Image (cartoon, helix red, strand yellow):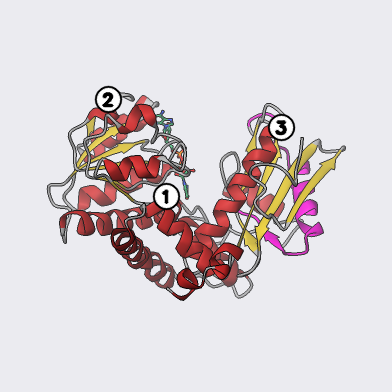
């Protein structure tokens, strides 16, 4: 298993491996870039098939966090951690405490938060050992869970996409399909319903579908049927890699705006979408509401403060960033995904962007 020559290595500043024999903890922390501040990113616990799969995941996710935070105007770098193990069977307080010890070895260069397989409650346990934990602010309605903020950011970004694509100021009567009505997707559906949109939803859990149908009057569709619907917009809120050679040719939508990470199976699919006239809203720009929330939790933690109004205003800047990306893509003829990467690189001072005076000045 190579590290420095790994395809996803991309100039990571630090990759740390940790093993605690007593608790069974096996974990990796990847710090991609700290030009703008300490690296903040969630801690994922997953039964990876092997160490190589865990390394690949942590490297890809940590790089993504650098781009996401830079794009959101946060004084944060990008990092991520993974715990190798089944969260339903192997997660114990001892293991989480050992994760806290691991965090301490980086002395604050990396700050963790909840992710797939870890919860607010787990972060509280890690926080008994380490101060380098966010996403656990006390006394808040959401208890530190960033999902409501992620959903609000997606809603804001989706409205910006509708405005750019159709010159629409509201979503009244717009048909929107949502893949995955879980923590983020259901909350997004609620916001869209309130804005007058017509909803089409799918999920792999019937109870999640039933909730959207019964509470929001959504129309249920099959898991595969979601790609064939004649609707205005598609909001992927479940899995990555769902925009691929098989699905894109079936889509009849005018724009895609959703929460899922890594929606494009490969970079080239951004070009395929563009050629089909589908406006793609880059995932890490539109789903940044959560990291924005976690950032304010982190900076407010020491003072015991959390200003929900400030968080909301910051999340609303996603619309401004989206418009910048859409307009630059239109002017240059490049894809929105490519432009988003360029803007982020300019912001965090990526070598390629600094060496290119045109883009650095733009
Ligand atoms: P979640 O697990 O609560 O919801 C995902 C939903 O998708 C679940 O209801 C699940 O049953 C459904 N699903 C899974 N596979 C499906 C399939 N093939 N077809 C249809 N539905 C399927 O997760 P979440 O927190 O709502 O996150 C959704 C997505 O957004 C994920 O990709 C996540 O990485 C991303 N994201 C979440 C946040 C956050 O704050 N929670 C932040 C940024 C990005």
Which residue was labeled with disc 3? 90
Nearest the eye: 14 or 351: 351
The disc, 1 or 2, on the residue closer to the chain's N-terminal end is 2
Mark 3: few, some, or many residues within 10 Å (few <14, many ≥20)?
some
Q: State how far apart marks 1 and 2 are (Cα).
A: 22 Å
Nearest the eye: 113 or 129: 113
Q: Which residue is drawn at 24% across and 33% down?
A: 213
Which circle marks residue 181 in the picture? Answer: none
Residue 347's place in the image compared with 341, above or below, is below
Which residue was labeled with disc 2? 225
On whether residue 104 falls in the magenta region, the answer is yes
Mark 1: few, some, or many residues within 10 Å (few <14, many ≥20)?
many
Q: Is mark 3 on a helix, strand or loop?
A: loop
Mark 2: few, some, or many residues within 10 Å (few <14, many ≥20)?
few
Q: In which quarter of the image is residue 275?
A: top left
Q: Position of residue 58 (x, y in %)?
A: 65, 44
- Image quadrant of ligand 1? top left
Q: In which quarter of the image is residue 237?
A: top left
Q: Where is residue 230 in the image (x, y as percent from the top left)?
A: 17, 34
The stretch of residues the image draws in magenta is 88-113
Q: State how far apart marks 2 and 3 are (Cα).
A: 37 Å
Q: State how far apart marks 1 and 3 are (Cα).
A: 31 Å
On whether residue 45 falls in the magenta region, the answer is no
Q: Residue at x 59, y 52 (%)?
A: 63
Which of discs 2 and 3 lies nearer the camera? The answer is 2
Residue 65's place in the image compared with 46, above or below, is below
| Image label count | 3
Q: What element carries label 1?
A: helix
The disc, 1 or 3, on the residue closer to the chain's N-terminal end is 3
Note whether residue 247 is visible.
Answer: yes
Which residue was labeled with disc 1? 283
Find out if the beta carbon at label 1 lies less than 8 Å from the nearest ligand 1 atom.
yes
């Amino acid at each position: 298993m190579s590290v420095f020559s790994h395809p996803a290595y991309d100039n990571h500043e630090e990759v740390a491996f940790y093993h605690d024999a007593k608790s069974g903890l096996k974990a990796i922390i990847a710090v991609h870039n700290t030009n703008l501040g300490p690296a903040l990113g969630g801690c994922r616990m997953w039964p990876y098939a092997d160490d190589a799969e865990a390394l690949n995941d942590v490297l890809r996710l940590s790089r993504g966090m650098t781009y996401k935070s830079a794009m959101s105007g946060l004084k944060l770098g990008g990092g991520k951690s993974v715990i190798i193990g089944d969260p339903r069977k192997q997660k114990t307080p001892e293991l989480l405490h050992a994760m806290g010890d691991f965090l301490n070895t980086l002395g604050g260069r990396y700050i963790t938060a909840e992710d797939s397989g870890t919860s607010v409650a787990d972060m509280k346990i890690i926080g008994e050992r380490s101060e380098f934990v966010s996403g656990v602010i006390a006394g808040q309605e959401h208890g530190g869970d960033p999902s409501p903020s992620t959903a609000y950011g997606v809603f804001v970004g989706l409205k910006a996409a509708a405005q750019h694509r159709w010159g629409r100021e509201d979503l009244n009567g717009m048909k929107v399909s949502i893949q995955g009505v879980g923590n983020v997707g259901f909350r997004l559906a609620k916001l869209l319903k309130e804005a007058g949109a017509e909803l089409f939803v799918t999920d792999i859990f019937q109870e999640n579908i039933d909730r959207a149908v019964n509470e929001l009057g959504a129309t249920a569709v099959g898991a595969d049927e979601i790609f064939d619907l004649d609707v205005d917009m598609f909001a992927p809120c479940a899995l990555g890699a769902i925009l691929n050679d098989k699905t894109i040719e079936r889509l009849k939508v005018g724009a895609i705006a959703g929460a899922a990470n890594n929606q494009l199976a490969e970079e080239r699919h951004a070009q395929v979408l563009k050629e089909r006239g589908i406006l793609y809203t880059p995932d890490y720009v539109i789903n940044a509401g959560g990291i924005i929330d976690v950032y304010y939790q982190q900076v407010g933690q020491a003072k015991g403060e959390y200003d929900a109004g400030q968080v909301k205003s910051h999340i609303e800047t996603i619309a401004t960033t989206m418009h910048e990306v859409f307009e630059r893509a239109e002017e240059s003829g490049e894809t929105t995904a490519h432009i988003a990467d360029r803007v982020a690189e300019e912001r965090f001072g990526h070598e390629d962007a600094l060496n290119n005076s045109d883009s650095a000045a733009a």
